[in-house]
Image (cartoon, coloured by chain):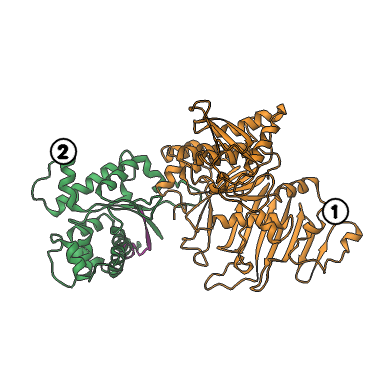
Amino acid sequence: MKRVGVVCEGANDFPAIAVLVRDLFHDRYGEEAQCFPLQPAADASSRSGDGGWTKVIAWCEANSGSGLNTYLRAPLFEGEEVYDIIVLHLDGDIAEEYAVKNGMIIGDVITVEARVGFLSGELIRIAVGVSDHLNKLKAAIPTQKTESWMLAAISSQIHDWEAVESKSILLAETGFFQGKRKSEHYREMSDLMSGKGDLVRERCRSFELFCDQFLPLAPPTSAPS
Amino acid sequence: MLKKLKIERFKSIYEAELNFGCANIFVGPNGAGKSNVLEAIGIVASALSRGMDQNALDLRGVRLSLPHLFKSAFKNAKLPAAFHISAKFEHGTYECSIRSGVNSPYLEFHSEAMFDGDQKVFGRGPRGARIYGQNSILNEIDLSAMDTHRSIWDILGSILKISDDFRSEINDFSNFAIYAPQTAVMRGLAIDARVMEPLGLTGSGLAQAFQDVLGARVNASNRFRIDDILSIIWKPGWADSVRVRPFDPNIVPPQVRSEGALIYIRDKFMNSKRNFVSPFDASEGTLYLIFVATLLAHKDAPKVFALDNVDGTLNPDLVRKLTDHIVRISSSGGEADVDVGQQVFMTSHHPSALDSFDIFNNNHSIFTVNRSGEKMQPQGATAFRDIRPPKGMTQDDWVLNHKGKNLSQLLLEGRIPGALF
């Protein structure tokens, strides 16, 4: 069983990412994986605290470099286990805002690859710091929002998957109604995503880029005759 | 000192084994079972004094639930005939199984046994009881008519031959009580009817107990230690003197129910004609500090005791100072370096309380307590976890690994498994 820590923008992102990561490990390596939320951080008053992209960046800065050791190398307490990898998630639609805040220029219209590459590069750069944890960090950057990946997995309609306002469409298509707890609805939708990783990869280039970070198993070498 | 406690089928605790130090703290969500473990200790203490008598349990701070509610009753788990507690001390072991029935007015002994070191002292089961290793009269004594709610130690303890060390341990431990001071009681607005010497579990009798402590200061050898313990009272910074005097209508409002004498606290910033306040007007935090200091310093207070959520009304700085104080006094005997053999069990919801504990020190124990463990069977059973550093890791490496964070920070970041939820 692989242990995967997940640093994501919001509590509702976690269940969807967890399902996709679990399927990815199963399909690619034939291994079971269990995801654990690292951010949004639990706080003293509730199960998960505030989210938002700034908290993801802050988590990477706070645990940068050797700070990752307690997650990836040696645990803090006896009986605890470290994580095999950590998935760092950001919604791609914050790329412009992030660039402006950091005095960067990314252009008015950028490709999916450029957007994902820009944010992935920033996340990994900040988190890795001076350490050798590069291979254990994977960036999950949906071009717009995690809901794009969810919509791609669930929807029977045809959409421009990574360009639409996926959140409102997803909620409408899945029959969300006022009065229902949104977190519960997101969990239910995430359950529906199980086994749909191939479909998401086919429909969303950004998810394909996420999957590409997980090396395929080397083909078996033939025994010398 | 109580070294180890094994609990089975008691309230929310299905099965647990806990190793204790001098200073022990339980942290975890509400309803996790923190108070239950204190009550399990209280039941052993009661068994080693007056058995399962309701009054004896009450005086130890064990909630007087209906007898059948002491046994755990998890869904999909067989309802046990009895709950079982085994207590290992430095010099011996005591274990008991306690049963109850829906119609039983008392908890009753199903079985019990005591070992002095490895030597069995007595044993009791549904088919009878027997004494071991004593003279021929005692070894053959017929215990068949013994009340089922009284323990063998309660009836025969004073004449049973065991080592002095173990007897001393039992004597200290059997006075164990769970203290949960209440503001209304300490202010004189409510009465706790339980008569408990020297200090009531909720704070009744505080003035007299504090007066006793002041009286003990006349002995120079005690003075240093007592002053060290009482020094916590001045930490909030506004009080510089506490005295015990009769009811003074110029200071105390008439609604206060006086027990004869009252504590008066001097506010060092007020003019000399109006600088004393009674507990009614004093800060809640200072009352709690006086309570804890009195408990730690009074010569007749239990040496083994629990403080249930005593820091609930204190600000984080004061929580840290109070817990530092309790841990230091109980672990070392204070600056006077007198080993008074105190052992304290605390529950807390305050992250700052953890910062007084050193997870590398075996005299200190932090337990996280929760009921959300996915692997716990049956589901919802209380899970305890003794928070220790990884085996073989040095303290320096540990500090470097978490970048010098306090345990309170790690708790709030969710890095201490099981502490938040």
Q: Are marks 1 and 2 on the same chain?
A: no
> Residue at point 17% right, 48% down?
A95
B324 up-or-down from B102: above or below: above
Q: In this view, does B348 lie above or below B141?
A: above
Quarter of the image for residue B316 reads: top left
* Residue in the picture at 68% in, 51% down: B195
Chain letter, orange: B
Q: Identify the residue position indicated by label 1 in the image.
A: B159
| Residue B336 in view of the camera | no
Residue B73 included in the magenta stretch of the image: no
Front-most of residues A21 and B170 = B170
SS for tag 2? loop
Marks counted in the figure total 2
Q: Give the range drawn in magenta.
A: A25-37
Q: Which amino acid does label 2 sit on?
A: Gly
Task: Judge left or right: residue A80 versus residue B190.
Answer: left
Q: Which of marks 1 and 2 is in front?
A: 1
Query: Circle 2 sits on which residue?
Result: A103
Q: Left or right: A37 with respect to B182?
A: left
Task: Give SS at disc 1.
Answer: loop
Instruction: Locate the N terminus of chain A by quadrant.
Output: bottom left
The one nearer the camera, A78 or B297, is: B297
Q: Are marks 1 and 2 in contact (CB under 8 Å)?
A: no
Toward the right, the furthest residue is B136
Q: Disc 1 to disc 2, how far (Cα)?
A: 84 Å
Kind of residue at disc 1: Ile
Of all chains in the rendering, the one displayed in green is A
Q: Tag 2, which chain?
A: A
